[in-house]
Image (tube, helix red, strand yellow):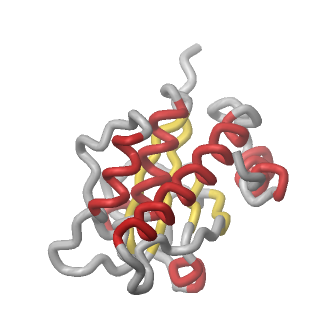
Amino acid sequence: MTERCLNVLFLCTHNSARSILAEALLNHLGQGRCRAYSAGSSPRPNQQPHPLALAVLREAGIATDGLRSKSWDEFAGPGAPAMDVIITVCDNAAGEVCPVWPGHPVRVHWGHPDPSAGEAAEAQKLQAFRQVRDRMQHALRAWLTQAPPAGADAAALQRWAQALRSPTLQVEP
């Protein structure tokens, strides 16, 4: 019997930095076991992924083709892929009232600092993006080793999703 991969949606406010990083990283690391998506609660008009997010992904050898900023509305309506897990990666999105997601996926908050915030010099921002990328990559790699099989019950998915918040997965690489 072929098992489907787990669908994971990463949410942030503008869908330009952290959620884009997480989507690309999980798709790269998941090797078909997971399919990651990202969206924002309120992307700005004509929002694009932050250039430094794309740069640090490419720097790590991770494909950026097809990455784009999008609204979470794309994933809440008919015809959208059914999500197994929804992860907010910024505190603003975690506190917002989310759409009713088809299938009632497991939800968890996994906060990361915004590498694009503030008025830092370009070199400092680039370093901030690298730090977020590296923390996410380290944690997601460890998290995937604990992944339940596709088709796992809601309790197993909830335990797995909550493990992402574990301090042992947040240790610097």
Which quadrant of the rendered structure holds the C terminus? top right
Depth check, front residue: 25 or 126: 126
Q: Residue 30 sits in which quadrant?
A: top right
Describe residue 132's horizontal placement relative to residue 62 as left or right: right
Q: Position of residue 157 (x, y in %)?
A: 72, 47
Q: Residue furthest top?
A: 1
Depth check, front residue: 99 or 34: 34
Q: Residue 109 sits in which quadrant?
A: bottom right
Depth check, front residue: 171 or 83: 171
Q: Residue furthest left?
A: 46
Q: Position of residue 167 (x, y in %)?
A: 83, 58
Q: Position of residue 93 (x, y in %)?
A: 51, 78
Q: Position of residue 106 (x, y in %)?
A: 65, 58
Q: Report the residue at 58% width, 61% height from top.
A: 87
Query: Is any part of residue 72 visible from this angle?
Result: no
Q: Report the residue at 42% width, 69% height from top.
A: 125
Describe residue 60's horizontal placement relative to residue 104 as left or right: left
The count of marks equals 0
Q: Report the residue at 31% width, 70% height from top.
A: 71
Describe residue 87's horizontal placement relative to residue 16 as left or right: right
Describe residue 124's horizontal placement relative to residue 79 as left or right: right
Query: Is any part of residue 150 visible from this angle?
Result: yes
Q: Report the residue at 34% width, 63% height from top.
A: 77
Which quadrant of the rendered structure holds the N terminus? top right
